[in-house]
Image (tube, rainbow, N blue to C red):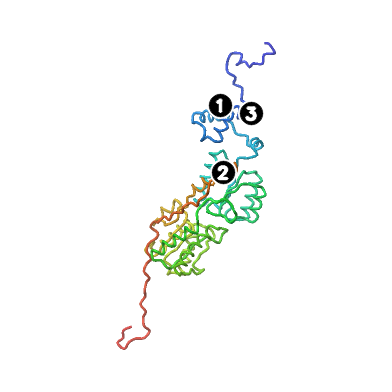
Amino acid sequence: MDKTDKKTPSQRKGQADTSPPPARAKLEHVARLAKVSLATASRAINQPDIVRPEIRERVLHAVEMLDYTPDRMAKALSSGRTHTVGAVVPTLGNAIFADGVEALEARLGARGYTLILSHSQYDPLREFRQIRAMLEYGVDGLVLVGDSFAPDALPLIRHHRTPLVTTYVCASRQGIPAIGIDNRQATYRMARYLIELGHREFAVIANTGLPNDRSRARLDGVLDAIAEEGIRLPPDRIFEAPLPSIVAGREAFRRLRAAHPSVTAFLCTTDAMAVGAVAEARREGIRVPEDISITGFDDVEIAAETDPPLTTVNVPASEIGTVAADQLIAIIEGAPAGPISPFEAKLVVRGSTGPAAAPVIRKRRSSMRRASGLA
């Protein structure tokens, strides 16, 4: 055999080379196999929506055949971006935040960005640590919730010059692009609706005890509406729940009802607490809405399945997540970002609210007995 012959036995027999591919496939290998340009292969992977379906399928097939994974570090060095976005939400236990994150991630993915997610559990120190870790990782942008952040968080973000948007509020005192609803106006309309039903005795179950500016705004909306009617809400008719949960709603309703049996309308700043309040009312034999009305906020899926179904405020979480992604990417890429208008928070009327029950008038029994013996 000629020692200069470098071919394998299979090649000398005219067979295809079955030797393993390079240890790590590169984008040019994908482009060559798919018979497209390097730029087209990149667009098919990072912005598939703008590539013709047949081209996209060829590129994705090549990706699968070669087991190709993008070299994010090399891409970051060449472009100055990591194509990652960080998001910190208070909790994933609330379906509103879960739905918003799902839409955010889907939109970012369609534009070639990867989402890094953390949840702070309403703890400012934990929120700060999560933001700092994301900045150290080199995220291209951040998505936060609300307008009250951990101390030193905003100075740190600005020091890194990292683009930022906030969500679930429609305006920011910090000058941050805000994508969300007017929480105060939404509960103002809810309270006005109850007033029109004849309610004058109110109580609120809120999670204002946590660092939560959205819940505070919702409480303020209720206070605004009832104040217009000359109604004052004493502090002991506001229950600050430790967490916005069904269990907390049960406990809050039990305590408020025991202390204030004249209350006919209970407004809750989340659906979870309202579901708990409805459940506790049923346990105590109190009819909803014949005896009392109960309202929630968020319009999560379970709100329509309670008995009776819950009157609430719809928060368009998926739309908020999608627009947040679009706005942040526009800022990151230097494209003109469109104007941001508040999302409509629709009042959803269901069976948990009704006209105020007539007050029970108890006949007073005289302590003096008449000569006839009648009381």
Dot 2 amino acid type? Pro
Q: Earlier in the sequence, mark 1 or mark 3?
A: 3
Going from N to C along the chain, the mark reached first, 2 or 1, is 1
Q: Quadrant of the N terminus?
A: top right
Q: Which residue is denoted by mark 3 in the rendering?
A: 23
Q: Residues within 10 Å of mark 1 (few under 14, many from 20)?
A: some
Identify residue type, mark 1: Val
Residue at coordinates 36% horizontally, 83% vertically from top-left? 366
Callout 3: 10 Å neighbours few (<14), some, many (20+)?
few
Q: Position of residue 53 (x, y in %)?
A: 49, 31
Residue at label 2?
336
In this rendering, position of residue 85 left or right of residue 228: right
Closer to the N terminus: mark 2 or mark 3? 3
Task: Specify the farthest residue to the left.
Answer: 372
**Mark 2 to mark 3 CA distance (whole Å):** 42 Å
Q: Nearer the viewer, residue 211 or 35?
A: 35
